[in-house]
Each structure stands twice: as structure tokens, then as C-alpha cells.
Amino acid sequence: MAHQLSIFVENSPGKLERITKILADEKLNVRGICLANAGEFGIVKIIVDDPDKAYDKLKEHHFTVSKRNIIAVRIDDKSGSLCNLLTILSSNKINIEDCYGVSVAYNNSAAIIIEVEKYPDVESVLKKNNIETLTDKEVYSI
Amino acid sequence: MYWEKDIETLSFEKLKEYQLIKLKETIFQSKKSEYYGKKLKDIDSSSINSISDISNLPFTTKQDMRDNFPYGFLTVPLDDVVRLHSSSGTTGNPTVVYHSKQDLDEWTNLVARCMYMVGVRKSDVFQNIMGYGLFTGGIGFHYGAEKLGVLTIPIGPGNSKRQIWFLKEFQVTTIHILPSYALRLYTFFEELGVDPKKDLKLKTAFIGSEPHSEEIRKKIELLYGLKAYNSYGLSEMNGPGVAFECQYQDGLHVWEDNFYIEIIDPDTGKVLPDGEEGELVITTLKRDAMPLIRYRTKDLTKIIPEKCKCGRTHRRIDRIKGRSDDMLIINGVNIFPVQIEKTIMKVPEVGDNYIIELKKENFMDKVFVKIEINENTFHGTLNEIEKLQKKITEELKSELGINPVVKFVESGSLPQSEGKAVRVYDLRNK
């Protein structure tokens, strides 16, 4: 199971910069990033090539950070493919907690990062429907 | 202009004699309670020869009242008690004050005396914008006004547009209101097209329940075109009607036929001479169901020794300067920081670093709770933080009646202090 890092940040200038600087200093490469904002604070979600190392480094710098399970799903880079994926999930009563797209233009396919409550379920559902998920290694080198 | 001329203008010497008689009666009465029965076991009221001998008696504190909850201070059978008022009890036992029929009559009379003093008569219309319920402010004035024969509108606080509608429709002349709410209410007039000076008949406002400056009073008088009088009271001493300004608005007359006042050094307990600033200590002189002897109010003020131009002999106290403890007055509600802390700490996800900030917003007090995000319970979702915010807000609302703004901040971003952390920052007068 691949991981992303969820980091609590106050919504003020320079916060994201500090996080990326810490990662850059450690030669960690950001593969995907997304920000969920709730006014005065937010959660930054980051995929890096070495999440364990990034987690430790951010902790060292007193960030409140959590590792979260994700699934990266490969879909075709064409109209309707995201809809197709979501239809499969919803018809199996799998609720998406969060989702964002990363790195299009990859062998004519795109990757969608999803967070759900029921991980074993989602994996078997996707497999049954011939939807390809990325391996951890692939995720970290999207 | 006097409600009870004989009493209000009683000569200084006569007043002292009267107080001595009443103090002896109070000691006798108080000893019927479990608490004073033990505490004053060795005190014989015949050994009290002058009112100043009171300084030989022990102080009574809010903590004593809590420790002897529920009936330790009660001197009459419960059957003779007709009402109680209580503080909120988040930090342990609440402080409860019991009133017999006689106590309520005395209290009502004192409030009537206060209102009459500044010209309120039965032809007036009175809108009571103060809170009713366990809080003594609203209900105390309500009965006083009715005793005067004044048409009384028991509207309570809030719903500003309705307040203005009543003020206008019934040509209200007299209001009782929190000073901060008076300023806030003013901001609604323009929108409704009502000019408080032209369209209303207001002439008198009673303002109290929270400390306010002379500037605030002047501002309220100017905005509404009325006279605003400062009112002082505390639930342990009935509520409103303990001390009140006369038409000269220069200090508050304490009704010394009902209350004996002393100013003490809050650290040593030593009685200070009139004119010196210290903590106000009050002894009830007429209380039936629950006399209190040398009760430490924790309010800081001084006694004004000079005679008042109004002819009343009852001494005045200066407006309250502050507190000798850390009690906060938030929109008229008395709250101790520890009550807020205990409420917040009941939520397990809250870490141990948080601060409480008090600020003024639209003239009203606003409580901001800033909490450092807890690394050990953070799971990385926005949802969990929003839920937590809501939970803390609701706890504070239901426990303390305050509506806070709860904010989460990054871990390590709040000031760390050595020893006992300073958690409450009162920025209201900054």
C-alpha cells in the first residue's frame, strides 16, 4: 500500500514553501501535491519518492504529519474514463474521502489518487473490473 | 426624590447604631446555619460593642460557599425558602444563594430605591434588556420596577431588531442593559430607520454587570440621548441593588442599612481606611435565609469618604477597578479561566497547549480558543479537525453559555511558559 503524507498547516504565506524546502534539502522529490483548505488552516497532501524519510524529516521540523494509505488508479487519458472508475466504486458502495489527479501524459494514461475507508474492498473491486492500480514503486516515481 | 427619606438620610451616627443592632442580629441568625454555627462558636454578639469590632470576625469566601454546598449556610427551614440563585458549577459545586420571602421583599425594595433615586416613576415604561433566569440581573430589576408600579417589559437580551421595535412602539423611557450590548444595539438603528434621539423617548439607562469606563458611559449617553447610571451588585448579596449611582453620577451609594462595607488589603486582610483602594468586603445586615459575614467580593474599589451632594448619608464606592482574583466577566457572565480549561480538557484530542484570548468584536466580548494540533491524535484529515472544532464549541456553549471561536494552530506555535502556564490573554482593552 502506497502512502501520502498529510500535513497540518496554518493558512499563511510561506508555509508551503517551508515544507517543500525541507523536502528539497533532503533531495526528496514531490510527485503529487494537493491542498485542502478550511479557512485559517488546511491539510497539505504530498506524495514523495520516499515517504518514510520525508515523514521523519517533517517531524524533526515539528510539523504535525500523518501517513495515510492511498491507491493510485491508472485510467485512460480520455473522456469518460474517470466517470467509469467512479461508477464502479459507487455501485460497490465505496465512498471516496478524497481524490486528486496527478501527472497526466503518461503513456496516454493518467493517475487518480483516491482515499477511501475500505481498502481491501476497493482493491478487489478494482481488480474484478480490470482497473489497473499502480504499485508503490510506480506511485513514488509517477 | 427619596424612596425612603428617613433611612437614606439617616445621620452617620444613627446609621452606625442601626448597623450595630443589625450586625448583632445577623450574627445570631447566622449561627443557626451549620457553617457559622461552627465558625462563630466562640463569638458572642454581646462582645461586639461597636460596628468596627466586625474586623474580629473571620472572612467568608466563595470557596467556603462551595465547600458547604448545598445547605451549609442555610439558617431557615427549607420550607421557608422561596427562591435560589446559582452560579454554573463546572469547577465543582456551584455557589447557591437562598432567599426567604422576607429576603426577596428586602431585595425588591432596594432595587426600587435605586430606580426611584434617579427619577424612575410609575408613569415610566421600562424595557429590561438584561438576562433573566439563574442570573440575578434581570429578575432583580424586574421586581424592583414592578414594585415602583412601572410598566415592565421582560424582554431579556438579544434579538436587536425586536428590541428596537419595542423601544419605539411602547415609547420606552427606561432601560436596563449591559453597556457592551448598548453599544452593539446602537449599530442596528440606522438599518431600521430609527433615530434613537428623535424617535424614542428614552431618558434613563441602568448599566451594569460588567466593568466599564467613564468613556463608555459618556458614549452611551451621547448616542441615545439619555442618562446612564452605573449599577453594582453580586448574586451573593442578592444581585443588583447593592450600590447604585444617584443623580450626580459620582460614585455608587452602598445601601448601608442592608450592607456593611469594608475595604481590605487583599493580601494581608487588613482593613484599610476610607479613600484607600482595596478589596470590597460586605456583610449582610438584614438577610434572613442566608446571612453572609465579611464576604470577600474580590472586587477592587475604594470608599469615597466625602459626603454626597444628594443628601444621602450612605457612603459611596468608586466604580469597580478590577478583580483581586482571575475571574473574567464575559458579556456580563462571570467565568473563571479554570472553567474554560476544564471544559476544553474534557475533549481528549486536545493537547495540553492552548490559549484563550478575549477580544472585543462589534462592542461585544468574543472568546477565541487557540489550540495546538495534537500530533498524537492527528490522522491527517480536515474532517476530524472540523469535527473537533465543533465539539469544543458546543461543549463551551452548553457548559458556560459562551460562544467561542475555536482555532487550531500548528504544534509549537503557541508560547510555552515555565511553571503555571499563562493561558488567558485578555485583549479587550488593548
Image (cartoon, rainbow, N blue to C red):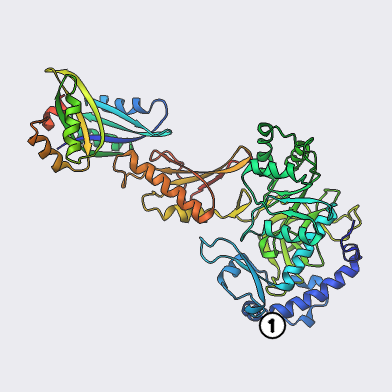
In the displayed structure, B308 sits above or below A38; it is below
**Residue B247 horizontal/vertical position (percent):** 86, 50
**Residue B328 horizontal/vertical position (percent):** 60, 51
The secondary element bearing badge 1 is classed as loop
Decide which of B330, B131 is in the foreground and name it: B131
In the displayed structure, B94 sits above or below A2; it is below
Of the 4 image quadrants, the one containing the C terminus of chain B is top right
Q: Is residue A31 in view? A: no
User: Is residue A118 shown left or right of residue B111?
Assistant: left
Q: Which residue is mark 1?
A: B42
Q: Chain of mark 1?
A: B
Residue in view at x 76 percent, y 51 percent: B126
| The image quarter in which residue A58 lies | top left
**Residue A100 horizontal/vertical position (percent):** 25, 28
Decide which of A95, B15 is in the foreground and name it: A95
Residue in view at x 67 percent, y 69 percent: B59
In the displayed structure, A125 sits above or below B279; it is above
**Residue B55 horizontal/vertical position (percent):** 75, 70
Of the 4 image quadrants, the one containing the N terminus of chain B is bottom right
The kind of residue on which mark 1 rests is Asp
Q: How many other residues sit within 10 Å of disc 1, few (<14), some (14-19) or many (≥20)?
A: few
Decide which of B414, A121 is in the foreground and name it: A121
Counting labels gives: 1
User: Is residue B147 shown left or right of residue A17?
Assistant: right
Q: Is residue B201 in view? A: yes
Name the residue at the front extreme.
B169
